[in-house]
Image: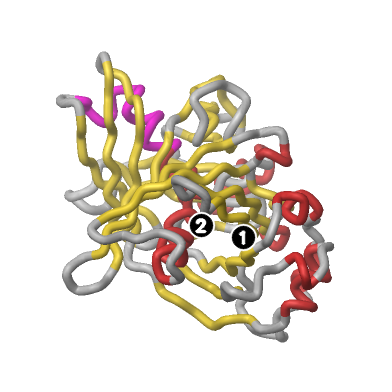
Amino acid sequence: MSRKIPFTLVDVFTSRPFGGNQLAVFTDAATLSASEMQELAHEMNFSESTFVMAAESARAARRVRIFTPRREIPMAGHPTVGATWVLASRGEIALESANVDATLQLGIGLVTVTIASAGGKPDFVWMAHREPEFGAKRRDRGRVAKALGISAADIRDDLPMQSVSTGNPFIFVPLRALDALAKCAPNEASLAALFKAGEQSSYFYMFVANESGEFSARSRMFAPQDGVPEDPATGSAAAPFGAYAATYGLIKPAPSASFLIQQGVEMGRPSEIRVEVVRKNSGAFAIRIGGRCAIVGEGAMFL
């Protein structure tokens, strides 16, 4: 006899249905094996699917496992924000005040989320990130540009191409103009060729900074090695981008700075991610990212 595995569909980092980043939240995944979760994520074929179960820590409200169509990953932004929104909408995270903190258990450990509510329903979700880790700078502008389908002249030379991570590593590629951003094309073989054999590959995050007036950015993110040619909203990149922007003078987080990232425009799924960066007395960054969601459907898969 087949099992019915319920799920909720939610669009993340958007306030309207059918924008943002699609997410399937399997709300009762306790009976699923890891291989079954992977099969369901592959069948859904979203950039990620989440699987919710009882937490192993008394400090956490729920454990959340995150799968791309090809593999499990330790953390991601839009799955965490979207799963939180669904849990709060179902009453599994009680909205007892206008702002409620909760803890989720992810692959990287315990993560704090904050739900702002209105009328007993979630209105905005923040996700705190751990301190960023800066990796190597890339100096092969020509090779990177060719792999992305643009010219080396399209990449700014006053900012570095550099890997930064708060759980997943992203290589940030600063572009000069929106037409260059529009020309970028994901190609798995070309991007994979940028890494040596046995070297851990990173996701590529291209951005154009708007530095006139209030700072903001437009971005795209390619992860073809995970079966995700392009992602319409990447919360796990937004936080390290906040650290990158603060480090290289695009924003001034003293004592704090907040800005908006627009992503997914070229895909027809516009997304908005809010980033908040605070420089602590130690000099380290405290970063959180957030946005709204729209629940668009529910159903069940059969196993």
51 to 4, vertically: above or below: below
100 to 145, vertically: above or below: above
Q: Measured from the top left, where is residue 280 in percent x and y?
A: 21, 65
- Give the magenta part as a residue range: 82-95
Residues tagged 1 and 2 counted as in contact (Cβ below 8 A): yes
- Residue 124's image quarter? top left
For disc 1, the marked residue is: 205
Residue 85 lies in the magenta stretch? yes
In the rendered view, does 274 fall on the left or right side of 136? left
Q: Residue at x 44, y 46 (%)?
A: 214
Residue 246: mark: none
Q: Total label count?
A: 2
Amino acid residing under circle 2: Ala
For disc 2, the marked residue is: 237
Q: Residue furthest top?
A: 119
Q: Nearer the viewer, residue 117 or 285?
A: 285
Can residue 125 be seen by looking at this rendering? yes
Q: Nearer the viewer, residue 89 or 59?
A: 89
113 to 199, vertically: above or below: above
In the rendered view, does 183 fall on the left or right side of 26? right
SS state under label 2: helix
Q: Measured from the top left, where is residue 128 in percent x and y?
A: 31, 52
| Label located before the other in sequence (1 or 2) | 1
